[in-house]
């Protein structure tokens, strides 16, 4: 119904007003004149408001099967009751009191003007109507105008959409997802998740794993599978929430999540006295729902969002990207998603390429590509999608060449999967302190898929001063190193492959190599590792280098005297054809801290070794042709770690007595070499008088006993070491049984002495393991008798001196 606008008071004086009247009297007269009309208009608006509410109530009754009253209904109803009460008590009753609303009715005493005669009675110079009632009527008109605006506003808020919500909105909103039929391991996780939904006590579930491993895709498939959920579930809502990653403040994150849930529940426009949290909590209190979070953070709580434990029929599944979430989020079930096996990776790759003939004809190329993608479904999907567009052999070969490079180009990093991995790496990297970042860069110096001995890695970190060690002992360094490793594994930057070994994921290793060491220029670390790599560096590269890794690079020779005053780490291990190091090679390496030559073919160390005055760690283990240490080694006053196990140095050289900084010593002991006279009464000492002072300073000592099956030898070694038990934190005695290895060709003959020494052909990472040579023997012998620590004393955070292998029922001898 069309209603004319209310009459507003005019500021100008009315016609016929005599001169000399005050303006405020004229203004109030206008109010009195307009009051009857404005009052009638207000009455019409109130009637419309009543009708509007009645119509909405009738609609709710008719649509009760599909719509229900929400919180706004109660709020609007309360407002309506307040308005109607105010209208009756403060508008209608005031009018009745001041004038009469009916013909012939009188108002206040002394006022005989009826309501419909107010306009005429207000005109005239000598009108006796200018009494207190006149001013009360003027104020009443102002209140009528103001109240009419409030009535109109409420009319606009009373609509079916605002005061009701759908009873049964769509249970599931489908998400875009890749099928899991070609990834059996992920299909199994999906089935386990569906199974968990039937258990009432399983209300909080976490699915975790490194980025791009496929967690989100599994959740999307779970979401879509519930479109036709089993009747036993009886879900009212399946709510999908993408966790906001661009909001740093927890309160902003919570608000964003709440708005997404409110929109999903069709609660937009509703108000609640307890805010969005209360609105969500009340809406879900009696509902059966499944809330799927694609990501979450340890900085917020579900209770703050409005998801309460008191929701009896509510379940939450969270895809955990935050590594610290597990410690702060109470969950009933956890799923750890691992990277795909090569078989599953290849199935996914072939599925996306969708050309069975081409994949079969180029299976070698496909296998090489899949291997470089690290078993991450997101990366495989991204690269395979790119390769599907251009199925030319030369193009695929070019992609392999770029994938195998230690540093990727920007074209590769622009692909969706690799961009996601880089973002995940940058996010995890940003959580590390500066020195911890250096530690992860250092781990990248080892070849891809290389299992790195934890103890060696921590020793190198200590040598480079990356670890926070207020007390510079090995026990403190190993404890601090374990903390750093734990953080890196939580962030998925490293992964543990055994109790004593870690490995760096292939893709993360490349990203670490691409990123400069903190505080250093780019191109100060040179990595030439791998059987197909040319391990030679140019002169300018040696000059720029801070760290050089030439592990397993088929080196046969080194430059005569490279200019590299800034180098601090030099990895030359696992190059068996490297037999000669030029005499002046180490002359300009005064700042070198770590030198690793293990499993090379060197016979002698050059005299220039004495120039390494900053050297902290020297690894010569498994250099089988090395027979002596040069006299110049006495110049290495800062040397802390010396490993000469598996060399042809069978007795402890007296030169090491001058190594005042030595704290960790590992060597092999052969009785026949130290005591050529076979007469048992011949006196012998494993530690000569000149080395006993050095022994008092050691923190860690490992002795590999070769051919020492005589228990008397074991007892003698025990007796000598026990004299220094209070000084040595860790002692291990490892007993080899070489007679059991003869059939495998793992022995070499010591020239002129007839002494058998181990020369294990084992994986490169294990031959460098200082913790137990027994473990590498057990892998070599595959079920045969193994060498094992037969004596150990002391404890260490890293586990040095602890047996990690041995046949069932054997117990190591430990002195407490």
Image: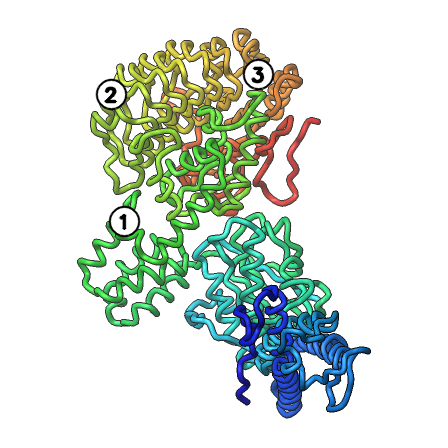
Left/right of residue 414 with respect to residue 785 in the rendered view: left
Distance CA(mark 2)–CA(mark 3): 51 Å
Which one is closest to the eye, mark 1 or mark 2?
A: 1
Q: Secondary structure at mark 2?
A: loop
* Discs 3/1, front: 1
Query: Where residue 562 is drawn, which disc sits there?
Result: 2
Any part of residue 653 in sight:
yes
Q: Residue 792 in the image: x percent, y percent?
A: 62, 28
Residue 608 pos. (x, y %): 31, 13
Location of residue 615 with respect to 19 vertically, above or below: above
Q: Number of numbered discs present?
A: 3
**Quarter of the image where the C terminus is located:** top right
Q: Earlier in the sequence, mark 2 or mark 3?
A: 2
Q: Which residue is mark 1?
A: 410
Q: Separation of disc 3 and disc 1 at Cα?
A: 70 Å
Going 37% across and 15% down the picture, which residue do you hit?
Answer: 612
Q: Which residue is mark 3?
A: 680
**Residue most toward the top?**
690
């Amino acid at each position: 119904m069309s209603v004319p606008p209310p009459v507003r008071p005019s500021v100008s004086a009315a016609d016929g007003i005599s001169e000399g009247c005050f303006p405020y009297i004229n203004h109030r007269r206008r109010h009195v004149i307009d009051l009857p009309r404005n009052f009638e208009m207000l009455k019409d608006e109130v009637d419309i408001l009543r009708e509007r509410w009645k119509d909405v109530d009738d609609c709710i009754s008719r649509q009760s099967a599909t719509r229900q009253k929400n919180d706004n209904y109660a709020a609007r109803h309360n407002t309506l009751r307040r308005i109607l009460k105010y209208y009756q008590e403060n508008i209608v009753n005031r009018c009745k009191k001041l004038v009469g609303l009916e013909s012939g009715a009188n108002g206040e005493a002394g006022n005989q003007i009826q309501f419909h005669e107010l306009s005429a009675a207000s005109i005239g110079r000598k009108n006796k109507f200018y009494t207190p009632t006149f001013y009360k009527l003027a104020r009443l008109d102002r209140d009528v105008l103001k109240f009419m605006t409030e009535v109109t506003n409420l009319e606009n808020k009373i609509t079916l959409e605002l005061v009701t919500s759908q009873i049964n909105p769509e249970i599931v909103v489908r998400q875009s997802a890749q099928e899991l039929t070609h990834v059996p391991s992920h299909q199994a996780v999906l089935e386990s998740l569906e199974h968990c939904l039937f258990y009432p006590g399983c209300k909080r579930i976490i699915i975790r794993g490194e980025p791009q491993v496929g967690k989100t895709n599994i959740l999307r498939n779970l979401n879509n599978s519930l479109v036709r959920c089993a009747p036993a579930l009886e879900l009212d809502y399946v709510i999908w929430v993408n966790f906001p990653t661009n909001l740093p403040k927890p309160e902003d994150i919570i608000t964003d999540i709440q708005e997404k849930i409110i929109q999903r529940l069709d609660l937009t426009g509703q108000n609640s006295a307890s805010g969005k949290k209360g609105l969500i909590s009340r809406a879900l209190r009696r509902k059966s729902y499944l809330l799927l979070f694609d990501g979450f953070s340890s900085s917020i709580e579900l209770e703050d969002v409005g998801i309460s434990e008191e929701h009896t029929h509510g379940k939450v599944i969270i895809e955990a990207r935050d590594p610290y979430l597990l410690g702060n989020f109470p969950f009933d079930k956890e799923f750890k998603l691992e990277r795909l096996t090569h078989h599953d990776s290849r199935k996914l790759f072939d599925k996306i390429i969708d050309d069975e003939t081409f994949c079969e004809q180029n299976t070698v190329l496909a296998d090489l590509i899949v291997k470089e993608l690290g078993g991450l479904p997101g990366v495989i999907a991204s690269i395979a999608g790119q390769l599907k567009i251009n199925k030319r052999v030369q193009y695929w070969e070019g992609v392999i060449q770029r994938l195998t490079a230690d540093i990727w180009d920007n074209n590769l990093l622009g692909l969706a999967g690799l961009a996601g991995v880089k973002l995940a790496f940058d996010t995890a990297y940003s959580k590390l302190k500066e020195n911890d970042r250096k530690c992860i860069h250092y781990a990248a110096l080892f070849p891809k898929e290389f299992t790195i001995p934890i103890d060696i890695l921590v020793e190198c970190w200590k040598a480079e001063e990356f670890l926070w060690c207020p007390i510079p002992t090995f026990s403190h360094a190993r404890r601090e190193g374990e903390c750093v490793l734990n953080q890196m594994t939580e962030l998925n930057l490293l992964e543990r492959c055994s109790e004593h070994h870690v490995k760096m994921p292939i893709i993360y290793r490349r990203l670490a190599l691409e990123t400069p060491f903190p505080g250093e220029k780019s191109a100060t670390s040179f990595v030439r590792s791998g059987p197909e790599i040319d391990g030679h560096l140019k002169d300018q590269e040696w000059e720029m280098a801070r760290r050089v890794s030439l592990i397993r690079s088929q080196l046969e020779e080194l430059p005569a005297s490279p200019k590299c005053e800034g180098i601090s780490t030099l990895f030359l291990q696992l190059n068996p054809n490297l037999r000669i190091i030029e005499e002046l090679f180490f002359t300009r390496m005064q700042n070198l801290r770590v030198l690793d030559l293990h499993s090379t073919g060197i016979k002698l160390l050059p005299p220039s070794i004495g120039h390494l005055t900053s050297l902290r760690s020297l690894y010569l283990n498994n250099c089988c042709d090395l027979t002596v240490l040069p006299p110049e080694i006495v110049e290495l006053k800062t040397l802390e770690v010396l490993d000469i196990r598996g060399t042809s140095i069978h007795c402890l050289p007296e030169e090491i007595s001058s190594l005042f900084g030595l704290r960790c010593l590992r060597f092999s002991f052969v009785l026949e070499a130290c005591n050529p006279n076979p007469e048992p009464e011949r006196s012998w000492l494993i530690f000569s008088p000149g080395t006993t002072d050095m022994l008092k300073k050691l923190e860690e000592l490992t002795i590999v006993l070769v051919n020492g099956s005589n228990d008397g030898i074991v007892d003698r070694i025990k007796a000598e070491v026990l004299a220094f038990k209070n000084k040595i934190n860790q002692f291990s005695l490892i007993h080899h049984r070489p007679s059991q290895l003869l059939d495998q060709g793992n022995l070499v003959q010591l020239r002129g002495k007839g002494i058998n020494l181990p020369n294990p052909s084992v994986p490169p990472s294990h031959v460098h393991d200082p913790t137990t040579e027994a473990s590498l023997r057990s892998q070599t012998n595959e079920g045969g008798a193994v060498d094992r620590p037969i004596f150990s004393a002391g404890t260490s955070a890293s586990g040095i001196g602890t047996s990690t292998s041995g046949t069932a029922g054997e117990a190591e001898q430990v002195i407490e």
